[in-house]
Amino acid sequence: MSFLQVSGTKIVDGDGKEIILRGAGLGGWMNMENFISGYPGCEFQIRHALGEAIGQENSEFFFDKFLEYFFMDSDAKFFSSLGLNCIRLPFNYRHFEDDMNPRVLKESGFKHLDRVIDLCASYNIYTILDLHTAPGGQNTDWHADHGGHIANFWNHKDFQDRTVWLWEKIAEHYKSNKWIAGFNPLNEPTDPSHTRVVEFYSRVHSAIRVIDSTHIIFFDGNTFASDFSHFGDAHKNWDNTAYSIHDYSTFGFPATPELYVSSEQQLRRLRRSYEKKREWMDTRGLCVWNGEWGPVYARKQYDGDAMGTINTARYQVLKDQLDIYNQDRLSWSIWLYKDIGFQGMVYVDLETPYMTLFESFLAKKHRLAVDAWGADDSAVKSVYQPLLDHVVEEIPEKFRDLYPAPVWRLSDRITRLARNILISEFLVKEWAEHFVGKSVEELDAIAASFKFEACQKREGLNKILTDSAKAVQ
């Protein structure tokens, strides 16, 4: 057993044998996300609201049991049985320090991270540690857990200093663990200047290397891991480093411009989008890792009889993307392993205590389209269209495209602030109120809804992933 290393464009073991990492992200676990587990808004908001609703002790009990049940031995065993060999572990900095008590390490943060890393190792599964949420918010999205749309990580040096400090602590803790494939220091940065991200990467790379000279460092591109155009020759100072793209396709989401049928034109668009993201690496002979990708899926309770047709097309997007990746022997981590039914390889059964408790609330969330990820806004489009029309009428066109355009279009920015942030805030306490009056045993049962044994398997997705893993060795 040896540390994995980057060699040119490849990841290799200690004998120089190429290792292609194929797996998934454990999203929604140590960095909870609204569409994954069904709450509104951001994680810090629901944790605060639940503490107010049922008391801090009961709240902490529920969230700790949730973390325990979300990934256990049965999950690792199943994952390994599919022929997959790597799990990306997203985590929130709040597990390791508090904003009101910065740079004081909470050792409890390692409790579940250690447990899952060891579980994965016991089934020959590598892990990649991903700081999904950094102090101040490194990107403009809900999963940066800051509650707004400004990535203040780039505006306040202390946020960056704290993140470097945290990676020093993590590197020290895990420097001898050979089952960790590497460190992913910052998920999906959105630095408007495109230069501060490179400067930060140089800082964190140097800080980690003082402590840990062996683990791979995986750097995401700017603007949600899509843009390396301002990285220049910075890579020359970064050893044993790979570069992460996130290759989501619009064909895999409800807002797709057309039904996906694998036409020549659609296949060209898939490949062109992918190749554009990795162009900087390819011109320099660098190693590429696809840290996130994958369609979302229709659900019977929301999409009715159209579910089959929709998901058949989404699976075809998946297959065609995998064909492209296999041609390049690309390492990848699909998003995601487990959720409540939208994207996961396994998903919580509708008959579990959690899903029955929140059945009406989840339907309301879906109707209001308060989650940004893959939202169907057909029921509320008429509410927000007048606001969009108002902005178009009053704001000259040349001032409308604010960063992170073009990823956020004008309509995306308006609905993000008005719908995904504002309306979500009003739903947070409503979510927490569902737990009022529950006994400790009932809280445990609700959390246990996320156990592997309480989940359904997305067989179509899992078969495609398994077949692909077998196709390229």
Image: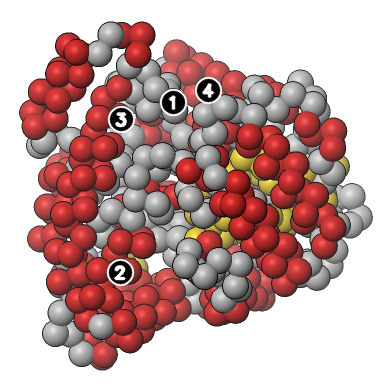
Please determine whether, in this image, residue 110 is positioned above or below residue 193.
Answer: below
Q: Secondary structure at mark 3?
A: helix
Q: Dots 1 and 4: beta carbons under 8 Å? A: no
Chain-order first, disc 3 or disc 2: 2
- State the separation of the CA atoms marked 3 and 2: 26 Å
The structure residue drawn at horizontal position 68% and vertical position 42%, both measured from the top left corner, is: 200
Q: Dots 4 and 2: beta carbons under 8 Å? A: no
Chain-order first, disc 1 or disc 4: 4
The structure residue drawn at horizontal position 64% and vertical position 53%, both measured from the top left corner, is: 161
For disc 2, the neighbor class at 10 Å (few under 14, some 14 to 19, many from 20) is some
Chain-order first, disc 3 or disc 4: 4
Q: Quadrant of the N terminus?
A: bottom right
- State the separation of the CA atoms marked 1 and 4: 20 Å
Residue 403: mark in rendering? 1
Residue ID for mark 2: 48
User: Quick check: 297 left or right of 120?
Assistant: left
Q: Is residue 276 visible?
A: yes
Residue ID for mark 4: 273
Residue 171 in percent (x, y) is at 73, 64
- Closer to the observer: label 3 or label 2? 2
Q: Quadrant of residue 59?
A: bottom left
Q: Secondary structure at mark 4?
A: helix
Residue 413: mark in rendering? 3
Q: Amino acid at mark 1?
A: Tyr
